[in-house]
Image (cartoon, rainbow, N blue to C red):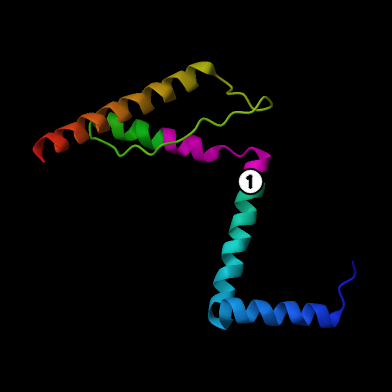
């Protein structure tokens, strides 16, 4: 399927009509961000999980309650954790933060 100049021009005109001139740069930026995130997920970049675990550990160490964000453990056969002990401590930290948040929500629910 060959696309010539008339077809490409028609596609550009339709895109401009649908998105408008003002929103086109933001739309392209969002599309590029989505493609980058998709590629990062395909390559198995799990740095976000490490950052989240460190943030939860810092909150638990400070003695404050932290808001728990539901996360999934993403491991692939090629990328297993280097140290099972680290994974265990991270899971315990998440569990402690979740329990603290649960108690906080139950107390709020009782007041209401």
Q: In the depicted view, which residue is nearer to us: 17 or 28? A: 17
* Image quadrant occupied by the C terminus: top left
Give the residue drawn at x 15%, y 38%: 108
Q: Which residue is mark 1?
A: 40
Give the residue drawn at x 67%, y 24%: 77
Classify residue 50 as left or right of residue 105: right
Classify residue 101 as left or right of residue 73: left
Q: Secondary structure at mark 1?
A: helix
Classify residue 53 as left or right of residue 19: left
Instruction: Tell me, yes or no, whether the highlighted magenta stretch contains residue 42.
Output: yes
User: Magenta stretch: dominant SS?
Assistant: helix
| Residue range highlighted in magenta | 41-53
- Characterize the local packing of mark 1: few (<14), some (14-19) or many (20 or more) Cα atoms within 10 angstroms: few
- Residue 15 lies, with reference to residue 102, above or below; the image says below
Whole-percent x, y for residue 98 in the image? 32, 29
**Quadrant of the rendered structure where residue 81 is?**
top right
Instruction: Tell me, yes or no, whether the highlighted magenta stretch contains residue 30.
Output: no
Q: In the depicted view, which residue is nearer to us: 82 or 70? A: 70
* Image quadrant occupied by the N terminus: bottom right
């Amino acid at each position: 399927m060959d696309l010539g100049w008339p077809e490409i021009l028609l596609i550009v005109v339709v895109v401009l009509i649908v998105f408008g001139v003002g929103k086109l740069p933001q739309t392209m930026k969002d599309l590029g961000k989505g493609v980058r995130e998709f590629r990062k997920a395909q390559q198995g970049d799990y740095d976000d999980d490490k950052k989240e675990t460190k943030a939860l550990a810092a909150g638990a160490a400070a003695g404050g309650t932290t808001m728990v964000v539901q996360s999934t453990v993403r491991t692939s056969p090629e990328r297993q954790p280097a140290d099972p002990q680290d994974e265990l401590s991270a899971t315990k930290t998440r569990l402690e933060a979740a329990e603290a948040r649960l108690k906080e929500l139950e107390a709020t629910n009782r007041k209401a």
